[in-house]
Amino acid sequence: LPVLAIVGRPNVGKSALVNRILGRREAVVEDVPGVTRDRVSYKAEWAGRRFTLVDTGGWEPDARGIDAAVAAQAEVAIDLADVVLFVVDANVGATATDEHVVRLLRRAKKPVFLAANKVDDTRQEPNAAALWSLGLGEPYPVSALHGRGVADLLDVIMAKMPEVSAVAKQEVGGPRRVAILGRPNVGKSSLLNKAAGEERVVVNELAGTTRDPVDEQIELAGKVWTFVDTAGIRKRVHLQQGADFYASLRTAAALEKAEVAVVVLDVTEPISTQDLRIIDLVLESGRALVLAFNKWDLLDDERRRYLEREIEQDLHHVTWAPRVNISARTGRHLEKLVPALETALDSWDTRIPTGKFNAFLTELVAAHPHPVRGGKQPRILFGTQAATRPPTFVLFTTGFLDPGYRRFIQRRLREVYGFQGTPIITNMRVRE
Ligand code: GDP
């Protein structure tokens, strides 16, 4: 989906505007494993068009950090959004920080809209008009709190929003889009450099591909791949505070553009909550997943035993993800990355015909009926695969299935069909 990013100083009303745009309804996360903390992106819809709303302001710095934090927000928005919405408090007027952000935003070759917030009635409209001075074009007076002006603003934004997402464009056979993710120092940029080697392709020659300068096209094993947000990998965030938040923001926005994620882990260090959080973001995004265990050249026997135990304990929910044990330094097993990516993407694209899926369900239920609950036994009437990317199944039932039974269905799906490298979603429609 196309991405709209909201940027602005603390307290200008970004969250209120996000809630207003979402109609205060948070995206419903259905059957996706992983825990949601500090959400940064939301599925939103306006006038029948769907898009992803990225709230860059989820982390509020203290007074000393404001300039750096807002600049970091702007940077993420410029690199990864299709359209940027810059929010200013009309009653305060343009501050030095606002002007600083405007200078950054002007460098972006992306549409930027200026929302003059807290214009709760017509008497405050001159405050909005004063923001013409920022040089971002027309300030749109809005009241995020009361909803005033928000619909008009969304209408003009939608007119500038690209029709199709970057991912959808790839369906005609362009290069597949890969995000390399991981916490700092696990070896992402080393991996990128080693993989690219001498064969780095300059892109614009490839017909029919639109490309962001933050992405890079690299030929691996005779095929061109688009690595998204390589700018984010090469850049270092120099923030005193909030660096984790901005890393998450970048990760979530990069996932929006990618089809498959390579999560890089450093085998010389214990698997951390930050690693797990990144994997959670991939699961939430519904993208395909490959795990790359890097720095294998530094692994000794003792650490290796620990690592195996950690994988069992911490990564049991993603045993389906292909794993490659690599060294970005020596190049060990780097050639295994491409087959792993291809496997994951094939699974992500897989469609099981309805007839086959129902035969699978019939057999499964015959061998392992759902347990009886309070004298009732929910039955599965029918099932169908509603979507690919990732495979999403809908089960029509006569009652709610136990979570354990749904997990069992997913396990059986994997046993029978593989689905290596892709999350699977199973939704239920209960008939009364
Ligand atoms: P990034 O922050 O994830 O992009 O990590 P870098 O690619 O900058 O790597 C961080 C450090 O780990 C650098 O000093 C690299 O040289 C080192 N490094 C990366 N991959 C490997 C590897 O496979 N083996 C060894 N021994 N060192 C590595």
Image (cartoon, grey):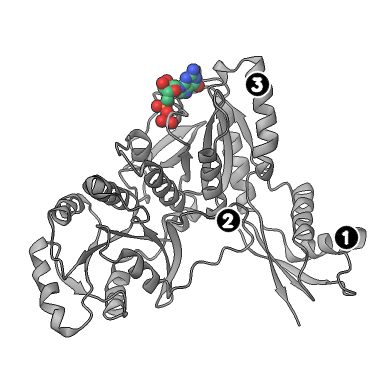
Q: Amino acid at mark 3?
A: Arg
Vertically, is 137 above or below 148?
A: above
Task: Name the secondary structure under disc 2.
Answer: loop
Of callouts 3 and 1, the N-terminal one: 3
Vertically, is 121 above or below 233?
A: below
Q: Which mark is residue 389?
A: 2
Vertically, is 77 above or below 217?
A: below
Residue with the mark numbered 1: 363
Query: Is residue 352 rendered to the left or right of residue 349?
Result: right
Label 2 vs label 1: CA separation?
Answer: 26 Å
In percent of width and height, residue 27 lies at: 50, 66
Query: Nearer the viewer's eye, disc 3 or disc 2?
Result: 3
Residue with the mark numbered 3: 304
Of callouts 3 and 2, the N-terminal one: 3
Residue neighbourhood size for the residue with mark 3, other residues' Cα within 10 Å, grouped as few (<14), some (14–19), many (≥20) = some
Task: Name the secondary structure under disc 1.
Answer: helix
Confirm or deny contact between disc 2 and disc 1 (CB under 8 A): no
| Whether residue 322 can be seen here | yes
Label 3 vs label 1: CA separation?
Answer: 41 Å
Q: Nearer the viewer, residue 225 or 88?
A: 88
Query: Nearer the viewer's eye, disc 3 or disc 1?
Result: 3
Task: Name the secondary structure under disc 3.
Answer: helix
